[in-house]
Structures are given as structure tokens and as C-alpha cells.
Image (cartoon, coloured by chain):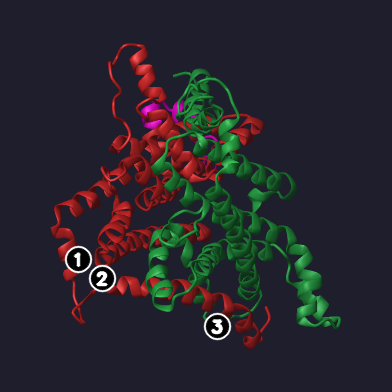
Chain colours: A green, B red
Amino acid sequence: MKPRVFTPLVLFLVIGFLIGPFFIIVAASLSGGETLAFPPQGFSLQWVAKVFTVESFRESFAISMLLAIGGTAAALVLGVPASYALSRYKLPFGETVRTIVSLPIIVPGIIVGLALLRYIVVPFGFNITLVLFLAHTALVLPYAVRVVSASLNNLRSDIEEAAVLLGSSRAGAFFRVVMPNIRSGILAAFILGFVTSFNQVPVSLFLSGPGVRTLPIDMLSYMEITYDPSVAALSALLAFMSIGIVFLAERFLGFSRYV
Amino acid sequence: MFQNRAEALALALPAAVFAAIVFLAPVVILLAEGFRNADSWSLVAYTNFFSDPLNRTVFLRTFRLGLVVTAVSAVIGYAAAFAIVNLTPRSKGQMIGLVVLPLMISSVARTYAWIVILGRTGIVNQALQLVGLSDEPIRFLFTETAVFIGLLQLFLPLMILSLISALENMPKDAIPAARVLGANWFQVFFKVILPLTKEGLVIGGTLVFTGSLTAYITPAILGGSKVLMLETLLYQRVTVANDFVSASVIAFILIVMSFAANLLLKRLATARNKR
């Protein structure tokens, strides 16, 4: 086949397959009808509006936001010093430390959720929200360490050694010399962590209690009860949110350098 | 390099201890549970698990779907990656952006779209009835085909991206040289492109395969209880039967697969760094 025909045809089919479903969700969520259908029956914003009135969506959105922001922040508080130790110090058992903090990326989330439910929530009676917070922190930790390590490795270490030689304390050198230079790496780690945590399902599957659920889990259980287009509307809104965040990050940070 | 060990440990330990307590310990205990029987170590849980025909079906189905999704995504991935690397730099960037875009969207949303498309009143059924190919709605949801399509859409971008970077690292004149020497496109692919991009194929394939094996949302939404896969089976065993022993067995299978894949990727990465 001639490349002139081959290239556009393949791209049309593949990109259509990857992106098409997203447009269909958007269209379905603007439907005027009572049930999920495509092509949409008429046009209305009723389902988009309904999303904001469903009590459980509002609650689980708040929880997911809290987990994504708080968990990512906590992961950075743990991860930035660890990355610094891994890249600047001769750390005993450095490889072991690196492996342990990056494990949560390798082990399927559903197993982590089950293990936490069975050995932390049940025996110690820990609060579900707290355990969700710990789980999301652990989940984001590998991303935080990876992205922050990458930006530390791109930064020459002699500038902070110079700061120390000139009389700054090690901590002073870190906060005044290193931090300003890896700020965009930390921000990139935060965004990646936020999106990962917010969209995360399997870890939270087993970790839901009365009134405590993350948004994706809430959407899953809502879908089991009703087929109305409000889940489509919510999906579309969330997709726009993620795309917007990533777009802005790419625009201002050159996000893709870090991921 | 700073030499102070105490400082290094003080910086690194909080993260490591946190991950060990919140993550490693509970998972290890969960896995150990599958090897315990009446206060001694045993493989009873495993022989019991595999003696149940339903479990065997689910196990084989998970692997079969993983392999099929990987194979199909490799074929489509090569076509797409090949088309993309031959574009002008500007449109190449845009196309890569479009391939990455779905990765940023929640997999619940992405999977949900297939209900709209494949459902009883979905687009496909409406189209079939419109052109008269079928009189009544055909059931696509809750079939292996639906799960296959969902997984393919979910993980195809990973394959395309790995193959794009593999094709870009290929010597620019390899294909024209082979063509000049009289190779047809079939030979060019199998004798030139494939050997030179093998590494990218393995990386993409591993990501797609482990992704499919450990997916939960897609089989849960598009397969339901009719098309169980290992993760949905695990969920069902726990919620329906309180059967933590089977759950531990499934968890072990999934973790072993995941680690094996990760090890392979690491090997490839270090091999590449050495060159």
C-alpha cells in the first residue's frame, strides 16, 4: 500500500479507536433522554447538572480530592528527602531502599487494598479514611521518588557543595540552593501523583466503609444501580479536569520531560 | 557525594519504613496465608485452587486474553508507530499527544464509554439493526470480546509509545537499503524492522501483558460475573465467600507475574545502558 494512503488511514482508525470513546461519553452526557443512548436524544445539560446534586458524588469527590492532595503531599514529604539521600549520599543498602519505596508500583493495587483491610483495618480498628490516606501515600511514593530523583540527577551537585564550603549548613544549602532548582520537578511529581491517586481504583476497592468511598468506586457502584447518563457526564467532567491539568503542566513545566 | 551515613539514613529511612509497614508487611502476610494450612506450611491452598474447574477457566482465560491483547496491540502498534514516525515533526508531536491523552483519563470513564457503544441500545447494535443485519439487539457486553476491546483500548497507547521510540532509534537508512537490495515489504518487516525494534516490542509487550493481567475495572464493567478474570475472581471470592485463602493464591500468581515482567524490563534497561 502506498504510504500516502496507508498513513492517514491507519492514524484515522487508531486515533479514532483511542479517542473516539471519549467523544461518545461527552455526547451521551449531553443527552436529553432518560437513559444512556447514542446518538443522544435531544440536547440538555440536565445530566451535567445532576452530577452536582448527587449527594454521594459530592462526598466521594471531596474524599478523592483530599486523598489525592494530602496523599501526594505526604508522599513528597517522605519522598523528597529519600530521593536526596539516594542521589547525593553514599547510602547503606541504597538499592534496597529504592526497591522498597518503588514496590507499590509493581504490586497490583487490589492486593494492597485487601492486605490493608485484613491486617490493618480489621485487627487494629483503624479508621478507613486514615488507611485510604496511608494507601494513597504509599501508592504515590514511587512516582514522587522517581520524578524527584530524575530532577536531582539533572542538577549538578557541586553547587550545593560550594554552598556548604561557603559556610551554609547542609540543610540551608538544601532549602536555599537545591529546592529552588528542583521546584518544577517537585511540581511535576505532585501533578503526576495527583492524577494517579485521583484515578486510582483497585487500592480503594476493599477500603470503603459507610459514607467513605473514593469517587471512582462511587461511580462503579452508581453504575450498578442505574444506567442514566449522569455517570457519563461525570466521566466527561473528570476527563476534562485531568486533560486540563496535564495540558497546563505540559505548557508551563514541560511535564513530559519528567514522566 | 556526601559521606555522612547517619544523615543519609535519617533522610531515607522515613520513606522506607513507611513503605515497609503500610505496604510490604501486610502484602507479605497476605501471601504467606496462602501457604499455611493448620499451623504448618503447605501447598494445599494451591492444589485446591487449581482443582476447581472454574478457577482453572478463569486462570487460563486471563492468560489467553492477556496474550491476545498483547499480540493484537503489537500488530496495530507497529502500523500506528510506523505511520507516526514518518510524519513531519510537528504533526508527529500532535499525534503522540493524542496517543498519550487517553492515559490521563480515568479508566472508569474510558471503560464506561464501551457500555454506550456496545450496550443493547448502543451504537453498534443500532447500526446493525439499521442496515438490517440483525433484528434484535446482540449481546456484546459481558462477553470476552467486550473485555478484549476494553483492554486493547486501555493499553494500546503503551505499545504504540514503546514502538515509536524503538523505530526512532533504528538506523534511518536500514529500510531504504533493504528495499534497494530487493526485499519486499514482508521481508523488510521480518528481516529488518522486527530485529531492530525487538527491544521496544518486548518493553511494550510486557507493559500491555501485565496491564491486562492485573486490570480490574475493564473485566468488572465489561465482563461482569460472566467473564471473570483473576482480579475480578479475587474480588468475588473475598466479597461473596469470605475466601481469603483463594484470594491469597490469586494474589501470589498476580504478584509473581508482575515481578517477572518488571525484572525483564529492568534487565533490558541495564542491557541498553551498557551499550
The type of residue carrying mark 1 is Tyr
Marker disc for residue B46: 1
- Judging depth in this view, the residue of A142 and A90 nearest the camera is A142
The residue at 61%/70% (across/down) is A79
Q: Which mark is residue B34?
A: 2
Question: Mark 2 belongs to which subunit?
Answer: B
Viewer-nearest of discs 2 and 3:
2
Marks 2/1 same chain: yes
Near mark 2 (Cα within 10 A), the count class, few <14, some 14-19 or many ≥20, is many
Q: CA distance from mark 3 to mark 1?
A: 38 Å
- Using the numbered discs, state the Cα–Cα distance from disc 2 to disc 1 in whole angstroms: 8 Å
Q: Chain of mark 1?
A: B
User: What residue sits right under mark 3 in the picture?
Assistant: A92
Compared to A249, does A16 lie above or below? above
Give the residue type that dot 3 points to: Pro
Between B75 and A54, which is closer to the camera in this rendering?
A54
Left or right: where does residue A259 sit relative to residue A126? right
User: Distance of mark 2 from mark 3, alpha carbons?
Assistant: 33 Å
Residue, x 41% and y 34% (percent of image)?
B115
Span shown in magenta:
B167-188
Q: Position of residue B125 (x, y in %)?
A: 35, 22
Position of residue B33 relative to residue A136, above or below, is: below
Compared with A43, A258 (above or below) is below
Determine crowd level at label 3: few under 14, some 14-19, many 20+ residues with C-alpha closer than 10 A.
few
Kind of residue indicated by mark 2: Gly
Q: Are marks 3 and 1 in contact (CB under 8 Å)?
A: no
Q: Are marks 2 and 3 in contact (CB under 8 Å)?
A: no
Q: Which chain does tag 3 point to?
A: A
When asked about the image quadrant of residue A52, the answer is: top right
